Amino acid sequence: MEVTLRMGGDHTVVVIPERETFTVGRSHRADYRVDGNGVSNMHTDLTYHAKENRITLTDRSQNGTGVIPRGGSPGDAVPVDKGVPTTL
């Protein structure tokens, strides 16, 4: 399953593997590293649920995480609740 990650003006498409978690963050322990002052060491977890063909995002950050609706711009980002899996 593919998902687009955006930080500031940059964005990239990553493939989320079918497994328990895929972590995004600044740490070298993260599965996908993102540099930036607003990015926590372990910023967010993404989980691909193959049977339901969906991805959930769990915010683990200090500064919060927002989800941009398909076709939206960064200004359209909707904050997600910390620690609560949110279906993308």
Image (cartoon, rainbow, N blue to C red):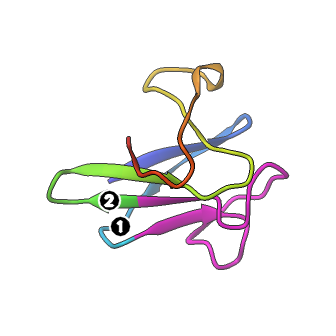
Q: Residue furthest right?
A: 37
In which quadrant of the rendered view does residue 62 lie?
A: bottom right
Using residue 4 as the reference point, say whether residue 20 is left or right of it. left
The reply, left or right, for residue 74 in relation to residue 38 is left
| Residue 32 to residue 11: above or below | below
What residue would you read off at disc 1? 17
Badge 1 or badge 2: first in the primary sequence: 1
Magenta-drawn segment? 21-46
The percent coordinates of residue 34 (x first, y second) are 70, 58
On screen, residue 32 above or below 3 = below
Residue type for callout 2? Tyr
Kindly give the residue lying farthest to the left in the view shown.
Answer: 51
Instruction: Check the image and report above or below for 9 versus 17.
Output: above
Residue 42 location, quadrant:
bottom right
Viewer-proximal residue among 44 and 18:
44
| Residue located at (42% from left, 69% from top) | 21
Secondary-structure class at tag 2: strand
Would you call the spot at circle 1 few (<14 residues within 10 Å), some (14-19), or many (20 or more)? some
Cα separation between marks 1 and 2: 7 Å
**Mark 1 and mark 2 residues within 8 Å of each other at the beta carbon:** yes
Q: For the residue marked with disc 1, what is the amino acid?
A: Pro
Name the residue located 17 percent from the left edge and 52 percent from the top edge.
52
* Percent coordinates x, y for residue 4 in the rendering: 50, 43
41 within the magenta span: yes
Mark 2, residues whose alpha carbon is within 10 Å: few (<14), some, or many (≥20)? many
Residue that appears at 85% across and 52% down: 37
Quadrant placement of the N terminus: bottom left
Q: Is residue 67 left or right of residue 34?
A: left
Disc sitting over residue 48 in the figure = 2
- Residue 39 inside the magenta-drawn segment: yes
